[in-house]
Image: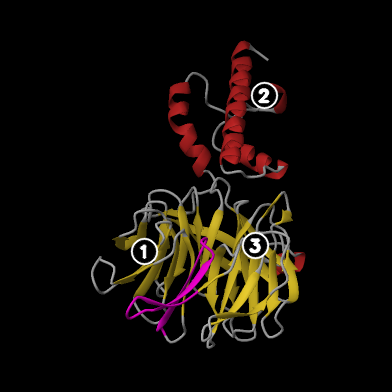
């Protein structure tokens, strides 16, 4: 090996160390658990970006680096981060900072909220911002839309919930004040007359939407609410809590009618199936301990059906996916381990996994239709994820983008 090749080798080694340190720093910053597979994948993506060196005893030297280090330094960062994203559309960002929550307003529009305190209506098919509402003075924790309307509700760390109408300007049309700590849960009754809110202050509140008057309040010790769902076509409300418990409320008496057996870890999120028969909840955790989602039968309160295990860190969100007539019922989960998983609802088989390296915690999912999901992340905004059935060859081999059942999962756009 001559002097020139020796210099290339040493520079290659130094750059590898730098990229390794960068990867580990990101992992520590976001409190991610780094697996050997993730590390190898990251270094491989760096190598494919133009910093590949083959020494004389291995064949032809492929790198044209030589003395053009200034050109390389100007572009290597961009190439390293975009090598695997060349097919991903990059739209204008919806937020400046982390995105905490996302939901659907219409087949083309989504609503999101984040640390920039804004509530943003975004056309995710066209890649453009339609409206940005400014009214909270701390970060937005949850957003919710009332189906079939232009109503938007947003909860915040400023202890309030604001109501907006896409067709009535950029000022809130209603304000719900009364909580003493961050509001983490909001849900609207099926008839659109009542709003339920839950907070870390242990209070569950029921409001009249038209007057913004709090009609019912109930405080339960240690009930630090993490999420709230209204059961479709019923008077029942379901909420998860940091006390590891799931509670079902009757909105008419505003009393707890059922309490599910406490899980081992904090329950972070919940969702109810469209038919109102099933509930899915997700768990906090670390190192693969906890981190599961659980399917419950609401017709038999406290009856656990299956568990979905596979995430390595906190499962932050869990949702039921739309299903076509006769199709397989599916659920989706997202985690602080930067992955989204799709599961067979009934068998708990993982149908596919999408890893978004560097995106940080994935904290919210919003299924738009049978094949499109929106995902909110701490580090890289919102992601448009597309689901496609794999080829017959993949299905026969049991492989897809996630390595199982022939389901292809990919990021189409980022904004």
Total marks in image: 3
In the picture, the disc for residue 55 is: 2
Local secondary structure at mark 1: strand
Q: CA distance from mark 2 to mark 1?
A: 50 Å
- Residue 9 pos. (x, y %): 63, 20
Depth check, mark 3 against mark 1: the one in front is 3
- Neighbours of disc 2 within 10 Å: few (<14), some (14-19), many (20+): some
- Residue 367 pos. (x, y %): 52, 70
Location of residue 193 (image quadrant): bottom left
Residue nearer the viewer, 93 or 91? 93
Location of residue 268 (image quadrant): bottom right
Q: Is residue 45 rendered magenta in the image?
A: no
Q: CA distance from mark 3 to mark 1?
A: 35 Å
Q: Is residue 176 above or below residue 48?
A: below
Query: Which residue corresponds to mark 1?
Result: 122
Q: Is residue 13 above or below residue 27?
A: above
- Neighbours of disc 3 within 10 Å: few (<14), some (14-19), many (20+): some
Quarter of the picture holding the N terminus? top right
- Dot placed on the residue nearer the N-terminal end, 3 or 2: 2
- Residue, x 67% and y 63% (percent of image)? 244
What range is drawn magenta here? 192-217
- Residue 265 pos. (x, y %): 69, 59
Q: Is residue 246 above or below residue 137?
A: below
In the picture, the disc for residue 212 is: none
- Neighbours of disc 1 within 10 Å: few (<14), some (14-19), many (20+): many
């Amino acid at each position: 090996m001559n002097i020139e090749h020796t210099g290339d080798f040493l520079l290659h080694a130094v750059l590898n160390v730098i990229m390794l340190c960068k990867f580990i720093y990101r992992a520590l910053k976001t409190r991610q658990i780094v697996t050997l597979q993730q590390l190898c994948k990251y270094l491989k993506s760096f190598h494919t970006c133009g910093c590949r060196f083959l020494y004389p005893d291995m064949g032809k030297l492929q790198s044209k680096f030589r003395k053009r280090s200034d050109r390389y330094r100007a572009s290597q960062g961009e190439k390293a981060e975009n090598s695997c994203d060349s097919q991903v559309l990059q739209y204008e960002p919806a937020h400046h900072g982390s995105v905490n929550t996302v939901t659907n307003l219409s087949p083309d529009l989504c609503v999101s909220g984040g640390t920039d305190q804004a509530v943003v209506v975004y056309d995710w098919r066209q890649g453009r911002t339609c409206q940005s509402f400014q009214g909270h003075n701390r970060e937005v924790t949850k957003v919710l839309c009332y189906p079939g309307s232009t109503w938007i509700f947003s909860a915040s760390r400023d202890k309030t919930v604001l109501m907006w109408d896409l067709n009535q300007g950029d000022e809130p049309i209603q304000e719900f004040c009364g909580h003493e700590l961050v509001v983490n849960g909001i849900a609207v009754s099926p008839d659109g007359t009542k709003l339920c809110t839950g907070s870390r202050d242990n209070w569950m509140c029921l409001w009249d939407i038209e007057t913004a008057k709090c009609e019912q309040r109930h405080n339960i010790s240690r009930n630090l609410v993490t999420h709230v769902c209204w059961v479709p076509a019923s008077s029942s409300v379901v909420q998860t809590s940091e006390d590891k418990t799931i509670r079902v409320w009757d909105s008419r008496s505003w009393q707890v009618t059922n309490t599910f057996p406490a899980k081992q870890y904090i329950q972070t999120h919940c969702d109810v199936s469209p038919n109102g028969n099933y509930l899915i909840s997700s768990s906090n955790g670390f190192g693969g301990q906890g981190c599961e989602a659980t399917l419950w039968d609401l017709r038999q309160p406290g009856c656990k059906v299956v568990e979905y295990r596979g995430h390595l860190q906190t499962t932050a969100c869990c949702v039921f996916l739309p299903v076509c007539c006769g199709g397989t019922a599916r659920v989706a989960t997202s985690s602080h381990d930067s992955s989204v998983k799709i599961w067979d609802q009934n068998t708990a088989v993982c149908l596919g996994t999408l890893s978004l390296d560097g995106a940080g915690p994935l904290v919210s999912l919003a299924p738009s239709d049978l094949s499109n999901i929106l995902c909110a992340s701490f580090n890289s905004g919102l992601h448009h994820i597309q689901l496609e059935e794999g080829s017959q060859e993949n299905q026969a081999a049991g492989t897809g983008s996630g390595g199982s059942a022939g389901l292809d999962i990919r990021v189409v756009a980022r904004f």
